[in-house]
Image (tube, rainbow, N blue to C red):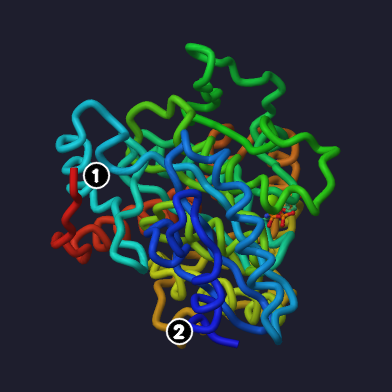
């Protein structure tokens, strides 16, 4: 089953005004493989109600194709460039200057978040490798370098920022519709945990997360930020890939542990970002070696150095290694991240060094970004 077959099937699905779906200009790239198909339909916020039925029919049409085991079609609301602000030209050129806008697979421009220079994802192929811990300390490290940093928790499976940053309060609304993020340790923070109830069954979270994510990007008063760090859900499944497609990412940081198994997952993570044209800024090896809290002795319990070799093999930068250390775990889980609470300690230094490499990679990525993107206002 190929992308072309999917598009052919979608010709039979009509938009509210009768246009065949592939001709409406609302489709994202169609990802098809392993019996799984997914793509998103992006329309003006005001038109969403009329399109829900189109989404359902598109999903049904794709499911009916031979060889298709699962189909996920996400309906997302996004104001187009031009409709978004009073000064579309200025907004558009500001977005371009920051290198944030990225041409989509159909040549349309994925809009950045106004005021936010660069959005980067912290991702991993599998869960529990220390992605959230890394995301928080990396964000704090970037902040320690003098950057204005926000952090967005997009992990539908288990939002962790409320715990890692000891946030108990709910965000306030401004003007009825927009949310005011929480500020902690100088970071501007928003978590999907604030929007999705823990009791919501997983099966609903997938589709919901797309609109929740759009909301967290567009309807939150992020203010001016140099970098927004996004803590992604673990894994490389449909939800993750859709998210990687929905957020105008300038780069991704992959977290891996040194074991072979985790590295296979890390490789999948890298492949996923390559597929959606997001540059991989580098790999962090977490729980790289064990450091005894009593005597400081280092033991390479997982056979250290795997991530660095893998990074070299794959031609992506190696950003650094973080030891498995009791203090990191205790502080993290108590909402007292080491970079903020022990800034002079050895762990904070490691994270700041990683942050500096990420910053340098971002600067490089901006230099490489193509300036030849045209937006119709
Ligand atoms: N370098 C480290 N040293 C010691 N403990 C660590 C380290 N990194 C992470 N941990 C601990 O490992 C556990 C998992 O970390 P974390 O929640 O950051 O992983 P994750 O990849 O985000 O997990 P999930 O997939 O569930 O989102 C936490 O208890 C955390 O405190
Ligand atoms: Mg996590």
Seen at 59% across and 77% down, the residue is: 268
* Residue at 21% in and 66% down: 368
Q: Which residue is at 55% across, 56% downward?
A: 243
Q: Residue furthest front?
A: 18
Residue occupying the far top of the picture = 175
Can residue 73 be seen in this snapshot? yes
All told, the count of numbered labels is 2
Which sits in the foreground, 106 or 121? 106
Res. 95 mark: 1
Identify the mark at residue 376; answer none if there is no mark.
none
Residue 323 figure quarter = bottom right
The N terminus sits in image quarter: bottom right
Q: Is residue 83 above or below residue 127?
A: above
Chain-order first, disc 1 or disc 2: 1
Instruction: Tell me the quarter of the picture where residue 305 sits.
Output: bottom right
x, y percent for residue 50: 55, 42
> Which residue matches tag 2?
314
Tell which of 219 and 269 is nearer to you.
219
Q: Position of residue 340 (x, y in %)?
A: 54, 34
Residue 242 coordinates in the image, percent (x, y): 56, 60
- Is residue 260 something one can see in this rendering? no
SS at mark 2 in the image = helix
Q: Horizontally, is 307 left or right of 367 in the view? A: right
Which residue is painted at 39% across and 70% down in the image? 277
User: Crowding at label 2, few (<14), some or many (≥20) Cα neighbours within 10 Å?
Assistant: few
Q: Position of residue 33 (x, y in %)?
A: 61, 82
**Does 200 appear above or below 295?**
above
The residue mark sitting in front, 1 or 2, is 1
Residue 167 appears in which quarter of the rendering? top right
Q: Nearer the viewer, residue 113 or 342?
A: 113
């Amino acid at each position: 089953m190929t992308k072309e077959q999917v598009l052919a099937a979608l010709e039979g699905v009509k938009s509210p005004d009768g246009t065949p779906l592939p001709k409406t200009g609302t489709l994202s790239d169609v990802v098809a493989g392993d019996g799984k198909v997914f793509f998103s339909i992006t329309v003006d916020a005001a038109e969403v109600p009329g399109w829900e039925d189109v989404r359902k029919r598109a999903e049904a049409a794709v499911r009916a194709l031979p060889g298709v085991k699962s189909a996920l079609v996400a309906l997302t609301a996004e104001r187009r460039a031009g409709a978004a602000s009073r000064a579309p030209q200025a907004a558009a050129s500001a977005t371009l200057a920051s290198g944030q806008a990225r041409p989509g697979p159909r040549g349309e421009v994925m809009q950045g978040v106004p005021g936010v220079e660069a959005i980067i994802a912290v991702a991993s192929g599998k869960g529990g490798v220390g992605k959230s811990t890394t995301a928080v300390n990396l964000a704090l490290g970037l902040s320690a370098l003098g950057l204005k940093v926000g952090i967005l928790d997009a992990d539908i499976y288990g939002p962790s920022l409320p715990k890692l940053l000891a946030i108990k309060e709910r965000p306030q609304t401004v003007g009825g519709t927009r949310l005011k993020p929480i500020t902690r340790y100088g970071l501007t923070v928003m978590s999907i945990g604030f929007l999705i109830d823990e009791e919501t069954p997983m099966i609903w979270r997938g589709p919901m997360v797309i609109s929740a994510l759009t909301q967290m990007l567009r309807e939150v008063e992020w203010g001016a930020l140099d970098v927004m760090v996004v803590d992604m859900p673990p894994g490389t499944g449909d939800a993750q890939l859709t998210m990687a497609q929905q957020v105008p990412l300038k780069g991704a940081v992959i977290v891996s542990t040194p074991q072979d198994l985790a590295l296979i997952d890390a490789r999948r993570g890298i492949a996923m970002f390559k597929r959606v044209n997001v540059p991989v800024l580098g790999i962090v090896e977490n729980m790289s070696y064990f450091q005894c809290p009593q005597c400081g002795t280092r033991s390479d319990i997982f056979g250290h150095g795997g991530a660095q070799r893998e990074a070299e093999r794959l031609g992506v930068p190696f950003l650094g290694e973080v030891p498995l250390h009791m203090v990191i775990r205790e502080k993290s889980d108590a909402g007292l991240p080491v970079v903020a609470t022990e800034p002079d300690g050895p762990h904070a230094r490691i994270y700041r060094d990683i942050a500096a490499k990420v910053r340098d990679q971002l600067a490089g990525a901006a230099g490489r970004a193509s300036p030849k993107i045209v937006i119709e206002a």
